[in-house]
Amino acid sequence: MTRKKVKLAYITDDSARKATYKKRTKGLMKKLSELSTLCDIDACSIMYSPYESQPEVWPSLMGVQQVLSKLETIPEMEKSKNTTKAAEQLKKHCKENWEKEMTHVMFNTICGKGVVHGLNFEALSEINLLLDKKMNDIDKRIDELSKTPLNPQRVSSSSSSSLVALPPMMMVTPEVMLKTGTEDIVQADVNEMDPMQRHQWIMELMSNNNNNPQTHVGGDGMTFQFGENINPNNGL
Amino acid sequence: MTRKKVKLAYITDDSARKATYKKRTKGLMKKLSELSTLCDIDACSIMYSPYESQPEVWPSLMGVQQVLSKLETIPEMEKSKNTTKAAEQLKKHCKENWEKEMTHVMFNTICGKGVVHGLNFEALSEINLLLDKKMNDIDKRIDELSKTPLNPQRVSSSSSSSLVALPPMMMVTPEVMLKTGTEDIVQADVNEMDPMQRHQWIMELMSNNNNNPQTHVGGDGMTFQFGENINPNNGL
DNA sequence: CATTCTATCTATAAAAT
DNA sequence: TATTTTATAGATAGAAT
């Protein structure tokens, strides 16, 4: 407070709390903006409140994307002294690559939404490449198996549609899937498409009216190297 | 400034800039903390500066994770009035599911690192499920193909190792892959493993000394529904 | 450089509209 | 309830150490 000293506790009065939220949020955003200007640092903030249906971000979705992109340059793996543990090294390398990829794709997904559809485009291209590779793997296995006397040991039950990266718990309910009209693209089996067709399929899935798909921000790749650096200044 | 009024511009003097950065960052964290307490809202902030090797986060990595988890509850798709465009609806549904999944996996990846390994565990379980499904798909196709006269139309060239979600551009360089010792787990072909073995493989890949793998924060699923809500208060 | 001090600027709680 | 006003708490630039 200012006419009174602030009691640092939850404000029970609804309207007072909302008023405080609005004022302080505005102040916070200003402060962040100032800091960013004065020191030329990259920062972002995300705030979720019941007063706005959408989370409030600073400086913008693009800004969030860029801050996170910048983090990519930090870690770069201190692979200078690979003494004797080459295996450990490689394991670490793979691990970091995995994290890098997941981070990359995901932030493109998050930040590309609504603001710059082109970000999704980039992520999609990679996923398309990935699907291509998986298709090749499948084909190769089929080829190999075709050359040997049949030995089908495993039997599967699920359908073969592969929706990029949807684990069962997240997937659209079977009901919805089945109730849809016949011409809907999502009913197609991705594995049965040729690469070009699949690419278009994914593109359409991701964006109904996709403009300037080439736009893209930040470098390629990205890593997120939080350590144990929880800031000691945290109020609580 | 306070002895002088702040000129909102980049501080050219290095030490002055650093001093300002330190002071204002501290202030910002405090403000965020206060807002969070006073209004019981979820918020997070990430700041990247040349003064710290690691990005400064508020309230913590866990906090970031939780803020983002909470966002899951917002959108839930206003599927109330599915007038006639059921196809459009489904396409949208799939799109959202895809985004949900990518967001989920990725933030688990980011935030689980260093602080709570259990978060990775959750993500890994899902990826493992995904791999299971893909294996089944492959098996099914093989079964189907085995029952028909061989018609190998496509020929592939790449090896069949499938490293979860690593597109070519991100992958560890082939050099490194080949130079490694023979016993290293990353040389194994994921597709050749049985589910249990693969699960263990991934677990080991992700964490060398994994404790309390059951810990997990926030609900399942997650969506990130930024709209066009760039805050009008943005300084620039 | 890092800390502490303090004069002054800035943010904002409560009141007024 | 939202906006504007105003008195005061809080943040902080520059100085001192």
Image (spheres, coloured by chain):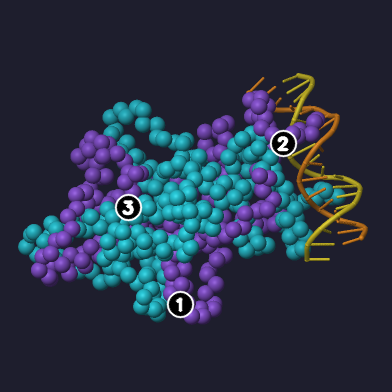
Chain colours: A cyan, B purple, C orange, D yellow
Of residues B9 and A103, the one nearer the viewer is: B9
Spatial CA span between label 3 and label 1 = 30 Å
Residue A110 appears in the rendering = no
For disc 2, the neighbor class at 10 Å (few under 14, some 14 to 19, many from 20) is few
Report the side of A77 relative to B74 (left or right).
left
Report the side of B20 relative to A118 (left or right).
right
Where residue B208 sits: x, y (%)? 35, 43
Using the image, determine if residue A219 lies above or below residue A151.
above
Report the side of D2 relative to B204 (left or right).
right
Task: Please name the amino acid that badge 1 sits on.
Answer: Ala
- Residue picked out by circle 1: B86
Residue B143, quarter of the rendered image: bottom left
Report the side of B206 relative to B82 (left or right).
left
Q: Which mark is residue A114?
A: none
Task: Please name the amino acid that badge 2 sits on.
Answer: Leu
Spatial CA span between label 2 and label 3 = 46 Å
Q: Which mark is residue A129?
A: 3
- Residue picked out by circle 2: B8
Task: Please name the amino acid that badge 3 sits on.
Answer: Leu
Of residues B77 and A209, the one nearer the viewer is: A209
Where residue A72 sits: x, y (%)? 46, 40
Q: Secondary structure at mark 2?
A: loop
Where residue A222 sits: x, y (%)? 44, 43
The chain letter for the residue carrying disc 3 is A
Where residue A233 sits: x, y (%)? 63, 40
Pointers 2 and 3 in contact (C-beta within 8 Å): no
